[in-house]
Amino acid sequence: MRIVSHTIKPALKGRLARLDTLARNLWLSWNFDAVSLFIRIDNDLWLAAGQNPVKMLGMLSQEKIDELAADQSFLSDLDEVYARFQRYLKSKPWYRGPSDSIIAYFSMEYGLDVSLPTYSGGLGVLSGDHMKTVSDLGLPLVGVGLLYRQGYFKQYLNADGYQQETYPENDWYNMPVERCVDQSGAPILITVDMAGRSISAGIWRVDIGRAQLYLLDTNIPENQPEDRTITATLYGGDKEMRIKQEILLGIGGIRALKALGIKVAATHMNEGHSAFLALERIRSLMEEFHLDFHSAMQAFIPTNIFTTHTPVPAGNERFGIDLMDKYFRAFVSGLGLDWNEFLSLGRENPFDNQESFCMTVFALHLSAKSNGVSKLHGEVSRKMWQGLWPELELKEIPIGHVTNGVYPRTWISHDMLSLLDRFLGPKFYFEPDNPEVWASVDRISDEELWRTHERRRERLVATCRQKLAASYVRLGMPDGEVLRSSDVLSPYALTLSFARRFATYKRGTLLLEDPDRLIKLLSNKDMPLQLVIAGKAHPHDQSGKDLIRELVHFSRREDVFGRIVFIEDYDMAMGRYMTSGSDVWLNTPRRPLEASGTSGMKAGMNGVLNCSVLDGWWAEAYTPDIGWAIGSGEEYQDQDLQDKIEAQDLYDLLEHEILPLFYSRGRDNTPRAWVAKMRASMKAIGSQFATHRMLKEYYSQYYEAALNESRALEADGYKASVSLAAYIDKVRRAWQRVRIVEFKDDGAPVVSRGTTITVSVLVDLAGLSPDDVAVECYKGRLSSKGEILDGARLPMTLVGPEGHYFRYQCAMHGEITGQIGHSVRVLPSHPALDGRFIPGLVRWAQ
Ligand SMILES: *Cc1c(COP(=O)(O)O)cnc(C)c1O
């Protein structure tokens, strides 16, 4: 049967057509006055459409459309919002540089809005917030991802509290995405080879303010049925499906940008999923500038940035050699690259032929700069990947950190936002990372801040009641039970919330460690505590699902019923209710396994106080005036013991500090000391953890340098990359024989401060010239174990040749007292290396 299809769009004419324009740009999602237009048309329809403006417009009856077209007050409000949107698009951006060279940002998922379910959790929300901020700041960056036919699963619980999953189909024609077409109106397609088959993909565009995101889609008639499923589900398939998705994202993504005429100068891999893009960018550099593989690789590396998110070794994605062989043998041989050399780029131990291919290792090897997502996670990552640079000291491992953030206008409730807009002024929109702007929170009265917060708590409680009752109805519970479920929680009680993925390290059940103590807190009549819990377990994670069931069973106990609820299907919408309507936000990861965490930032900006283990972002944000710390940053060997200690610490905090502070009220029932903490939390967390701070750091630490490198390399026809590749080849051949044959100094064992010590070495350069290397002294305080701490690098100067060798020396001044140590090393030196270390090419004195 041949089916012919047409896309039918709602017929909105004249000024009403502007509704359609607004509906198709994600700008709407963070501008409540735009959302309000849709709610005002028909609130029930808005909810029935899943808060999706495009879908809602398609559902409007012609009668309603005619009515709106004649409603002058509606039209004038629409004009006003539309004008604001236009002003936004034309506003002067923070970024004022050239926009001819583009950074392409790659992520497996994007959480932009509930109306676009192409995300599973934290990583997606981060990418979505990244893109919104790119729009605000006007950065020359486009996003690349995949368009999943089913997105991530929706969660519901069976009668036993066990998680079930459904996968609703996304209807792209009724969502804020636009198919990319050429001048003739035909869809733009790209192709990618997968194990000898050519797979086609279409491209869809998402407009996010003035930024663009491009999503690839294999669900098109040009493909075989099995290939159409490559973009069927997010994190749903087996390993082979996963490698196909990652080939599509990385290689297909670069091809898509080329097909769209976008010139990519630099790439940012947000997590290792997209690391195959390196191969396509290298291939395209080889083709366009007639470079060999190694020269093109040296041209690529300085223009690539990699962000790692995984502090658990097992969490770093690996592919077996059989799969790599099946999907990459032909591609790699086409590059003229030796197969084993290629595999070694993805191996921790390049000499282990059995080791599988690790995407994180591959990405680290192919990025001049990499980063973790909090200060602590940067440290953890340097330790975890130290083996890739065995000759370097820990602090020299080239992995830095940029702490994650959240996009304030998405995550601060509209009640609180309108209060903040009123007091913080227009600067707040574009500069939420400015502490001076946030200082005006002090001008809001205690009463108004508290009333606004209480309104959010009421809304959260109402939402929980609705959701719980709906799930009771679905489960076929008796009417009496349904009625009881629609009266759970109190709008006035201290509400402690916990919502996140149910992975074991997040310890979703830590609160149940001592059930009696928890029950005592929950059933206290004078100072009641109530709990709202939500979160999904990965469909294959049985232990995560067991945790959820345990919580649900506990919540159904008679003695705590109505004081603890589990809400199904945690998503961005529920996340917003919870992070704005709770009083305390709880996070209990097993340190240091939470790379950053972002939900606590959302809470903090809303005046919800954090009570968390000192891990991820909270390890750097916590101060006693803004929230509470569980423990003091210890790490334990015995996990059971850790759970016991930290649970007791949490109960103590609740009983002795949190509950008494919350219930200490003045005559007007405002908890002034609590409100003072809310203020402090909003100011500190609002300015420090806005994505605007994060993007500015990515720009100044990474993007700017990558763009400059790209321009400079291209301007000189990649001569520097060719010369660097040839240089590395030469140095590698000689390096085995490079050594320090003599290492001495003229200092006595004990010297007084200020004495100058001359360090002198004799180096065998094995035929290399002194211009090819740098010789340096590395010195610092000695630890009790005899290691150099806080090492500083001191260049040594060439004195001259001595026979076959070269003498270098430097002068050290004893500035600090105590036990000082030094060593010396030889490093490669080439202008295009720009301070980069090359694994294997560092020679220390033996
Ligand atoms: C913010 C958010 C997350 C990430 O929160 P973490 O604190 O990193 O666990 C996950 N899922 C949703 C729906 C979110 O809104």
Image (cartoon, rainbow, N blue to C red):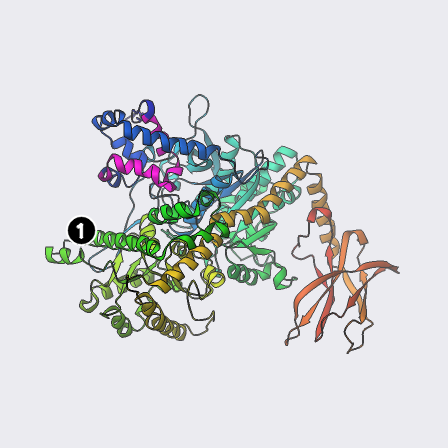
Write the residue at 64% across / 74% down. Answer: 783
Q: Which quadrant: the N terminus? A: top left
> Which residue is outermost to the front?
667
- State whether residue 287 appears in this view: yes
Q: Secondary structure at mark 1?
A: helix
Check residue 19 for magenta coloring.
Answer: yes
- State whether residue 405 appears in this view: no
Write the residue at 63% across / 40% down. Answer: 710
> Which residue is outermost to the top?
184
Relative to the observer, which residue lies in front, 415 or 755? 415
Q: Is residue 145 above or below residue 619?
A: above
Relative to the observer, which residue lies in front, 646 or 600? 600
- Please indicate whether residue 776 sits to the left or right of residue 42 in the image: right
Q: Position of residue 743 (x, y in %)?
A: 79, 68
Q: Position of residue 213 (x, y in %)?
A: 45, 38
Residue topped by disc 1: 474
Residue 103 sits in which quadrant?
Answer: top right
Q: Which quadrant: the C terminus? A: bottom right
Check residue 591 for magenta coloring.
Answer: no
* Segment tinted magenta in the rendering: 16-44
Q: Is residue 170 above or below residue 627?
A: above
